[in-house]
Amino acid sequence: MFTPRLNEKNKTINFLGFTFDGTAIAIRDKTTSKYYYRMGHKAKGVAHQHWRGKGYQGSDKLYRLYSPKGKYGKGNYFTYLSRTQKSFPNHSIMIREDRIMTKIRLILKNNRWG
């Protein structure tokens, strides 16, 4: 895949949210940051709807899109990562899933107006 001349220059390939440096495959930092930014932005919108007296409208969609448990339907970021992990079993590609549900709940709790 990579020629030895390129490896000496420490070049990396960025493609579809991943980086490849000739030996290791990893998620781009920008990809993970964008995931967390979008999750937080949508969670804040759901929290503001709750303050308006409409309840947590859209929270089911929020959990489906951004939680590891929502990956079984149409697919989300974790579906994409798990498919990639199956393609490259020798590389650790997945991000930590343990605190994502907690982060969503904290954003919903801390961003109510009023």
Image: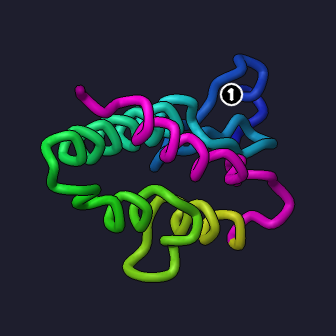
Residue at point 55%, 40% (across, down)? 103
Within the image, what quadrant is residue 56 found in?
bottom left
Residue at point 68%, 53% (across, down)? 97
Q: Nearer the viewer, residue 112 or 21?
A: 112
- x, y percent for residue 43: 34, 43
**52 in the magenta segment:** no
**96 in the magenta segment:** yes
Residue closest to the far top: 9
Q: Nearer the viewer, residue 33 or 105?
A: 105
- x, y percent for residue 1: 68, 50
Label 1 sits on what residue type?
Leu
- x, y percent for residue 114: 23, 26
**Disc 1 residue crowd, few under 14, some 14–19, many 20+, Cα 10 Å:** few
Residue 1 seen in the figure: no
Say above or below: 20 vs 11: below
Residue closest to the far bottom: 73
Q: Would residue 36 appear left or right of 111 to someone viewing this image? A: right
Residue 86 seen in the figure: yes
Q: Would residue 102 appear left or right of 70 to someone viewing this image? A: right
Looking at the picture, the colour scheme in use is: rainbow
The number of callouts visible is 1
Residue at point 41%, 67% (across, down)? 64
Q: Which residues are magenta?
A: 87-114
Within the image, what quadrant is residue 5 found in?
top right
Residue at point 32%, 65% (across, down)? 61
Say above or below: 92 vs 72: above
Of helix, strand and loop, which one carries label 1?
helix
Q: Which residue has dot 1 on it?
A: 6
Q: Nearer the viewer, residue 66 or 6?
A: 66
Q: Would residue 14 appear left or right of 49 to someone viewing this image? A: right
